[in-house]
Amino acid sequence: MKLLIGLQAYDIRIKEKLAKKERGPAAVQKREEDLAAAQALLQEEIDKLNSHDNLRRETEREIQDLDERLKKAEVKLSSIASNKEYTAALKEIEGIKLEKEALETAVIEQMEQKDELVSACDDNRKKSETMKKQFDQDRKQILRDMKILDKDLKKLEKERKLCCKATEGSLLKKYDVLRGHKNGVAITPVVKGVCQICRMAIPPQKFNELIRGDKLMTCPSCARIMYWGEDERYQQP
């Protein structure tokens, strides 16, 4: 029985190590996805800033074109003789000035918007850089942890094989079958008459037989191999 208890302890530890090992790649992937999302957001902000700069430059070119049109219109104005043409020219000049003022107002607004875009871009760049640095550190640590887990697993597997060799064949087979059907737990201690896995009370007569310890017994409820958990023999390492 003590060999079986030891064997189950190995299996539980191996299962825990394997679970941790499986979480490693998932943790790396999650951090990669978070970093990729941050970098995508940064690129989106950069694209917005570039588009904004292009729009502002286009607006400034339009203002320059209007300046040229205004100069030509003013030169033309000085050579006009008729009142009708003069009035039309003045109206054209006024229209150009109004259009120019609207574009200049737009440029001012664009410059104010640029400050916000630059600030958002800088914030996301810093965030992305921080996440990249943290990701590199986390990945290295996870890889180190994985190596340690591999080393621990090899040691546990080796010790488990020795324990299996020391266990009687039919008993080992029964243990393996139960372990496969009972979520990896084939052995259960009984403390104060209660199975510590399924939490069901053991009938008094069976509990007395269990205390005597002269035969292999299974829990009437969960069918796991049971042992008296208060027996000092089984509490020793």
Image (cartoon, helix red, strand yellow):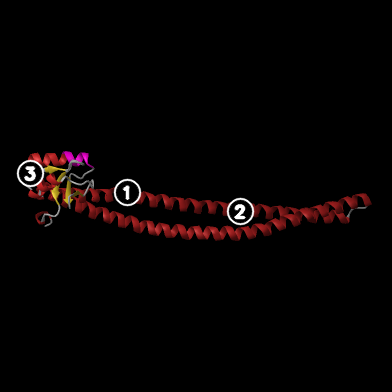
Percent across and percent down for residue 55 are 64, 52
Residue 195 place in picture, x, y as percent: 19, 48
Comparing 37 with 90, the one in front is 37
Check disc 1 and give the amino acid type. Pro
Amino acid at dot 2: His
Residue 155 in view:
yes
Verify whether residue 181 appears in magenta.
Answer: yes
The residue beneath circle 3 is 215
Q: Nearer the viewer, mark 3 or mark 1?
A: 3
Residue type of the residue flagged with mark 3 = Lys
Measured in 3D between alpha carbons, the distance from the residue under mark 3 to the one under mark 1, in whole angstroms, is 46 Å
Main SS of the magenta segment?
A: helix
Q: Secondary structure at mark 1?
A: helix
Q: Which mark is residue 52?
A: 2
Q: Residues within 10 Å of mark 1 (few under 14, many from 20)?
A: some
Report the span colored magenta: 177-182
Q: Residue furthest right?
A: 82
State the SS at label 2: helix
Label 2 vs 1, first from the N-terminus: 1
Query: How much space separates mark 2 and mark 1, taking CA atoms?
Result: 40 Å
Q: Which residue is mark 1?
A: 25
| Residue 82 seen by the camera | no
Crowding near pointer 3: few (<14 within 10 Å), some, many (20+)? few
Q: Residue 210 location, x and y as percent?
A: 11, 47
Q: Closer to the camera, 45 or 141? A: 141
Mark positioned earlier in the residue sequence (3 or 1)? 1
Q: Identify the image quadrant of residue 102.
A: bottom right
- Within 10 Å of disc 2 (Cα), the crowding (few <14, some 14-19, many 20+) is some
Q: Nearer the viewer, residue 98 or 113?
A: 113
Residue displayed at 75% across by 57% down: 101
Along the horizontal axis of the image, is 192 left or right of 101?
Answer: left
